[in-house]
Image (tube, rainbow, N blue to C red):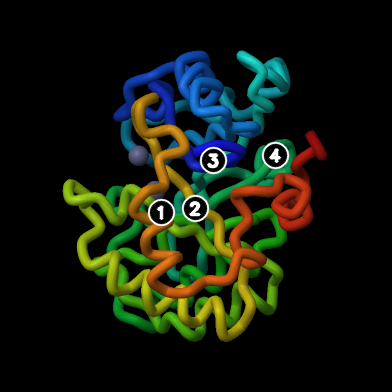
Amino acid sequence: MSDYIDLHTHTIVSGHAYSTIKEMACAAAAKNMTHLGISEHAPKMPGSCHELYFANLKIMPRQIYGVKMLYGVEANIMDYDGRLDLREGLLKRLDYVIASMHLPCVKPGNVEENTNAMIGALKNPLVDILGHPDDSRYPIDKEAVVRAAKEYGKVLELNNSSLTPTASRQGADENDMDILELCRKYKVPVLMGSDAHYEDYVGEFSQAEELLERAGVEDELILNRDYGKLQKYLKKAPLL
Ligand SMILES: [Zn+2]
Ligand SMILES: [Zn+2]
């Protein structure tokens, strides 16, 4: 695998991940990846970092071991209106924002509530990517979410970790197949994310790729292979 971009990765800073930024970049370089994004969990995730971590990312180098680096966040959707746990001033300074629902931060609601939460996040102009909308614990109206992504020009994530046998997000395979079919119908772009919590999993997209193939998703909808194409969807990320 080469020339792949991975924007969904966590380091020791997230509190339940096990490598450093340098180790993640080293792993990306070994896989000939061109771009790596670090997206720590935002502060409401138990054990993750203080907001100062995000404020100080400006000191970080744009290249490590030859890999072009992006610095974002995986923000937590905190309620059924889609509010996030990082203030606007900080979200604005990051290269990109993934918004996701996690059990320690928002209790699963009914279909209407979960759908509202995701659409609320998609409406937020500072959000670029909706993370793992495939979680059976948060059932949604998939068509409404995919249509909202289309309407607001956002990217849907196909999360490789959701598809692994040890995943806590059970039933993701089936949900992702439905979502991918809708992405094809509405021409919504898809970004594979490894959701790596350890260096070995950086750029690991085996299950996601298999699913993309099974769902017959056209290459032009997949954003992992061409940073120029991806960058058009990331309102704040520099062209690296
Ligand atoms: Zn995590
Ligand atoms: Zn997540």
Label 1 to label 3: alpha-carbon separation: 11 Å
Q: Which residue is mark 4?
A: 95
Please name the residue that numbered disc 3 is placed on.
Answer: 6
Question: Circle 1 sits on which residue?
Answer: 159
- Quarter of the view holding residue 61: top right
Asked whether disc 1 touches disc 2, contact meaning CB atoms under 8 Å apart, the reply is yes
Q: Amino acid at mark 1?
A: Asn
Q: Quadrant of the C terminus?
A: top right
Crowd tier of the residue under label 4, counting other residues whose Cα lies within 10 Å: few below 14, some 14–19, many 20 or above: many
Q: Which mark is residue 58?
A: none
Cα separation between marks 2 and 4: 17 Å
Q: Which residue is mark 2?
A: 192
Q: Is residue 92 above or below residue 229?
A: above
Crowding at dot 3, Cα within 10 Å, few <14 / some 14-19 / many 20+, comes out as many
Distance between the alpha carbons at the discs numbered 1 and 4? 20 Å
- Asked if disc 4 is less than 8 Å from ligand 2, the answer is no
Q: Nearer the viewer, residue 58 or 196?
A: 196
Give the alpha-carbon distance from disc 3 to disc 2, as whole Å: 7 Å
